Image: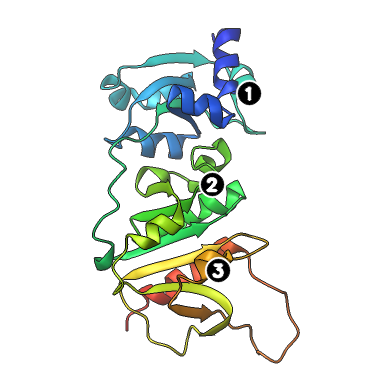
Amino acid sequence: MISKNKIKYIHSLNLKKNRDTQDVFVAEGSKIVGDIMVCDQTDARIIVAQKEWIESHQEELRNIKCEIIEVTYDELAKVSFLCHPQQVIAVFNKFKGQHSIKHLEEKLTLVLDGVQDPGNLGTIVRIADWFGIEDVICSTDTVDVYNPKVVQATMGSIARVNVEYCVLDDFFSSLSSSIPIYGTLLEGENMYEVPHSNNGIIVMGNEGKGISLPIRKRINKALRIPNYPETRETADSLNVAVATAIICSEFRRPK
């Protein structure tokens, strides 16, 4: 059984200020919780789960020192942020040892400028994980990666991708001038007709406004995802997560 105070505490973590104060975040579902549990960059504080889940994870739970609360489905529904609870919800410490933004000249990195939708950010983190991109750098006005909806959308990839927040102008000023900075702009070159490097920065912008003007000035390799055929009237733009997947796929395509 779970107490009303514990339910209230977990619900309070839906707010960023409370997550920041406690230095924790919430994850739900067997796949997501399982992926985070095996990550050595964080520890669980509370696990609330149905009996079936606890019994099937005895070996993993044996090595975890945290509060484990067995609940019924109805009790889990009172705690969950989801319409349909998925056996387990857990409170984890935020990831430690994340500040590893280095050697960027040797690899591909995503930079997000003002992405607001939790589902988009979570999906982009998942895309980065799929395409072997280790770092996602976010502007300070990008949605919090520890938002429960973002964590859910990552499907566990939050445990494998380093997500950092910073003032992007300062970040770009710290980079070597030799690092290619790609950005998707309407005036860019057709991305299928220009060569791409195996390293560099890929900038993706806000859902409605795109890449902000100050950051556009930092881009030295503007790209465009063409519609087909290009003469046909079509949608104004692509969803930012969809566009990110298309671009990452092209960069990872064997040259």
Picture quadrant where residue 46 is located: top left
Q: In this view of the protein, can residue 131 be seen by the observer?
A: no
User: Residues under labels 2 and 3: Cα distance?
Assistant: 17 Å
Q: In this view of the protein, can residue 251 be seen by the observer?
A: yes
Picture quadrant where residue 227 is located: bottom right
Dot 2 surroundings within 10 Å: few (below 14), some, or many (20 or more)? many
Mark 3 = which residue? 243
Q: Residue at x 33, y 27 (%)?
A: 43
Q: CB of mark 2 within 8 Å of CB of mark 3?
A: no
Q: Residue at x 32, y 63 (%)?
A: 175
Residue 153 is tagged as 2
Viewer-closest of 86 and 150? 150
Residue 77 is tagged as 1
Residue type indicated by callout 2: Ala
User: Residues under labels 3 and 1: Cα distance?
Assistant: 35 Å
x, y percentage for residue 28?
Answer: 51, 33
At numbered mark 2, what does the secondary structure look like: helix, strand or loop?
helix
Q: Nearer the viewer, mark 1 or mark 2?
A: 2
User: Residues under labels 1 and 2: Cα distance?
Assistant: 19 Å
At numbered mark 3, what does the secondary structure look like: helix, strand or loop?
helix
Residue type indicated by callout 3: Ala
Q: Nearer the viewer, mark 2 or mark 3?
A: 3
